[in-house]
Amino acid sequence: MKAIKQFIAEHLVNTEIFEMARSLDDYKELIRSQIEPLISHIILVMKAREENSEEYISHWKTEIRGFLGKFIGIKLKTKNSYNTRKKHIENIFYNEYELDTDEDEIIGIIRRKLFNEGYDFEDKQIYNDFIPIIQKFQNEYLPEIVDIIASDSTSKIMNFINKL
């Protein structure tokens, strides 16, 4: 006898509801594709705040809202819960990329965008200036970003953007 989950899944396969849901592989690829732009823009906002430069902050915050907004309303074909989404996000952020412990991994991810904004990480002074910002990002913002993406909450996105 088939398990009830398998029976339901087989009967939902060709329905509109099922077609709107994302496969786990698609969801993970979306997460991976947003790491570089999301982290780059958050780091740029943090650096601009440190330098008391408001010139581009509003623009970068709008971009961050757009990156996080891509996760709103996503339903997974498999178990679609906060805890399931959080587990997959943490696995990518913490195990695959080691964003919580490896500053050089983050520099590798953000280097191109920040170079285009005028920051060259081959300059040791610039590199050293960014290390405390990256560590603050790791300690203060990374767990919150995981929560925001997993929660599917527009109000959490707006609260995060407003406090940046």
Image (cartoon, rainbow, N blue to C red):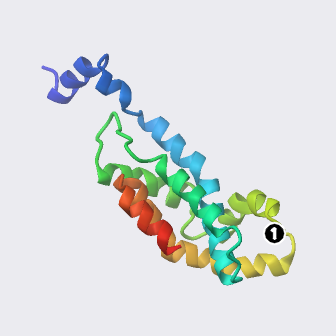
Residue at 49% from the left image edge and 46% from the top image edge: 70
The picture quadrant where one finds residue 10 is: top left
Please give the name of the residue rendered at 33% of the width and 49% of the height, measured from the top-left corner.
84
Q: Where is residue 50 in the image (x, y as percent from the top left)?
A: 67, 83
> Residue 158, relative to residue 54: is it above or below?
above
Viewed as shown, does residue 88 lie left or right of 164? Answer: left
Give the quarter of the image for residue 23: top left
Would you place residue 11 above or below residue 63 in this image?
A: above
**10 and 65: which is toward the camera:** 65
Which corner quadrant of the image does residue 11 belong to? top left
Q: Whole-percent x and y of residue 158?
A: 43, 63
Q: Residue at the spot x=47%, y=50% of the render?
A: 69
Per the image, the residue denoted by label 1 is 119
Q: Position of residue 162 (x, y in %)?
A: 48, 70
In the rendered view of the protein, which quadrant contains the N terminus? top left
Element on which disc 1 rests: loop
Q: In this view, does 90 lie to the left or right of 127?
A: left
Where is residue 139 shown, x and y percent of the image?
A: 51, 76
